[in-house]
Image: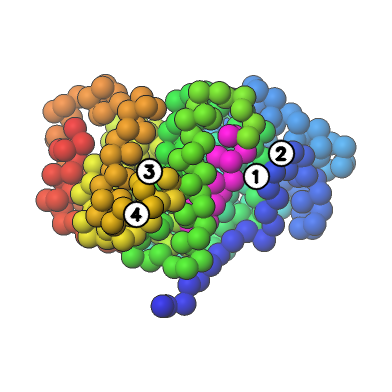
């Protein structure tokens, strides 16, 4: 087996109350002038204030940019960069879902390397950036532990995949208590995003022994807790399990890669502004059904990890049961199809060529067990409709 190259943040604090250790984390890293990067909701619900209080008590000066938008754009990243450049900051503290975290990571790279964000998209490898301390509030994208950011180009509407060590947070404070406020739809969609990370990492052509064990653990936790976390938002055990699994899913995919689901999902988000987790959820059962025959042994192990097959099932039976279980899961969680979501049929079919090309250009489909050509991706989008 080839050597696995694993990248992780220098500091990971995981557990209820971890965000209460921000001041201590900054001190450990020798940082003293943070700019918070967050969004209006996280200000309104008091999460930012609790962090500000810690810094005030530690006599640290800080700034705040609170205008992150869902699915960050080159314009919103530029606005944050402007605030950074106007002050005297030595690091960024990202508070929020993947959108706030990716905004901070993009700003970190632009602050050090200059240029425009499109200069840093794949296949470029931005390897330096300002330190970012990531505090995720969804469970989730795993962005707190990945050297990845996804930024939409305002000019072309492309959801650009950017990858490089400069995008890796130096520290992540993974505090499930910040997810107790997530409503049903956000819990379901971000949870399925994490499930996709774990499953895609495990079946990826770039999977390795290190990411395999983490991916299987994450799949088990997500599959057994996601319904409870959605139905009982205050269930701390379910929230804790989902948060840990989201971070594990992030570690798994960032060190193995995502595959066809994410490759096809980004263009849907860019073209129709479907939240990222939801576009993954729309694709998960059909893309898995299309892929299983090429790697029944790996998909069967996913089925065993999630507990959706019998121990004695042959791989072909177990992998078929996986597809059935994923269809049931997305039904149970009320995942709408594109039409039900409100997307116009002619707009969907009119966009298929461009979406399929963007999916291929991201490189992710080439890591899938069954590698699609453009026509097969178009046919899959048609099937998902
Ligand atoms: P998000 O950050 O876009 O947030 C969605 C909404 O949820 C926002 O309105 C936000 O205010 C709200 N929210 C966040 N935390 C909340 C909480 N605790 N309670 C209630 N509301 C809350 O959502 P996301 O799914 O976490 O992030 C999606 C983005 O992350 C996409 O742009 C996607 O492409 C990107 N992504 C990045 C990576 C990576 O490795 N960098 C991986 C997967 C996805």
- Identify the mark nearer the N-term, 2 or 1: 2
The secondary element bearing badge 4 is classed as loop
The secondary element bearing badge 2 is classed as loop
Query: In the image, which is nearer the foreground, mark 2 or mark 1?
Result: 2
Observer able to see residue 188: yes
Residue at image mark 4: 312
Would you call the spot at circle 4 few (<14 residues within 10 Å), some (14-19), or many (20 or more)?
A: few
Spatial separation of the CA atoms under disc 2 and disc 1: 8 Å
Dominant SS type (magenta): helix
Spatial separation of the CA atoms under disc 1 and disc 3: 29 Å
- Residue sitting at 22 percent across and 60 percent down? 294
Residue 35 percent location from the top left of the image: 68, 43
Residue at image mark 2: 16
Residue 129 percent location from the top left of the image: 59, 59
Tell me if 194 is positioned left or right of 123 in this view: right
The image quadrant where one finds the N terminus is bottom left
Spatial separation of the CA atoms under disc 1 and disc 4: 37 Å
Spatial separation of the CA atoms under disc 2 and disc 4: 38 Å
- Residue sitting at 61 percent across and 54 percent down? 169
Q: Nearer the viewer, residue 269 or 309?
A: 309
Tell me if 336 is positioned left or right of 69 in this view: left
- Residue 174's label in the rendered image is 1
Would you call the spot at circle 2 few (<14 residues within 10 Å), some (14-19), or many (20 or more)?
A: some
- Residue sitting at 47 percent across and 30 percent down? 227
123, above or below 98, in the image = below
């Amino acid at each position: 087996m080839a050597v696995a190259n694993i990248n992780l943040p220098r500091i990971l604090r995981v557990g209820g109350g971890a965000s209460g250790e921000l001041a201590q984390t900054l001190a450990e890293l020798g940082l003293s002038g943070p700019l918070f990067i967050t969004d209006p909701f996280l200000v309104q619900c008091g999460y930012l204030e609790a962090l500000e209080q810690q810094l005030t008590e530690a006599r640290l000066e800080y700034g705040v940019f609170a205008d992150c938008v869902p699915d960050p754009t080159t314009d919103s990243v530029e606005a944050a960069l402007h605030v950074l450049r106007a002050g005297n900051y030595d690091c960024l503290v990202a508070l929020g879902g993947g959108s706030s975290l990716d905004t901070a990571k993009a700003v970190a790279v632009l602050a050090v390397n200059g240029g425009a964000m499109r200069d840093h998209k794949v296949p470029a490898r931005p390897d330096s950036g300002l330190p970012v301390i990531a505090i995720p509030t969804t469970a989730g994208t795993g962005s707190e532990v990945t050297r990845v950011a996804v930024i939409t180009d305002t000019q072309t509407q492309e959801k650009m995949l950017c990858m490089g060590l400069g995008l890796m947070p130096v520290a992540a404070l993974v505090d499930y208590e910040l997810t107790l406020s997530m409503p049903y739809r956000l819990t379901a969609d971000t949870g399925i995003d994490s499930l996709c990370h774990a499953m895609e990492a495990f079946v990826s052509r770039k999977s390795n022994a290190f990411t395999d064990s983490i991916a299987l653990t994450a799949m088990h936790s997500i599959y057994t807790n996601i319904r409870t976390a959605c139905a009982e938002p205050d269930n701390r055990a379910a929230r804790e399990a989902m948060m840990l699994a989201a971070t594990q899913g992030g570690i798994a995919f960032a060190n193995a890669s995502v595959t066809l689901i994410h490759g096809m999902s980004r263009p849907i988000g860019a073209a129709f502004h479907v939240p990222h987790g939801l576009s993954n959820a729309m694709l998960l059962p059909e893309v898995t059904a299309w892929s299983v025959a090429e790697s029944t042994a790996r998909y069967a192990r996913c089925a065993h990890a999630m507990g959706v097959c019998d121990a004695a099932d042959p791989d072909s039976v177990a992998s078929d049961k996986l597809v059935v279980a994923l269809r049931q899961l997305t039904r149970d969680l009320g995942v709408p199809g594109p039409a039900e979501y409100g997307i116009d049929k002619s707009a969907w079919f009119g966009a298929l060529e461009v979406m399929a090309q963007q999916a291929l250009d991201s490189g992710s489909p080439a890591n899938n067990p069954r590698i699609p050509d453009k026509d097969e991706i178009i046919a899959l989008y048609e099937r998902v409709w």
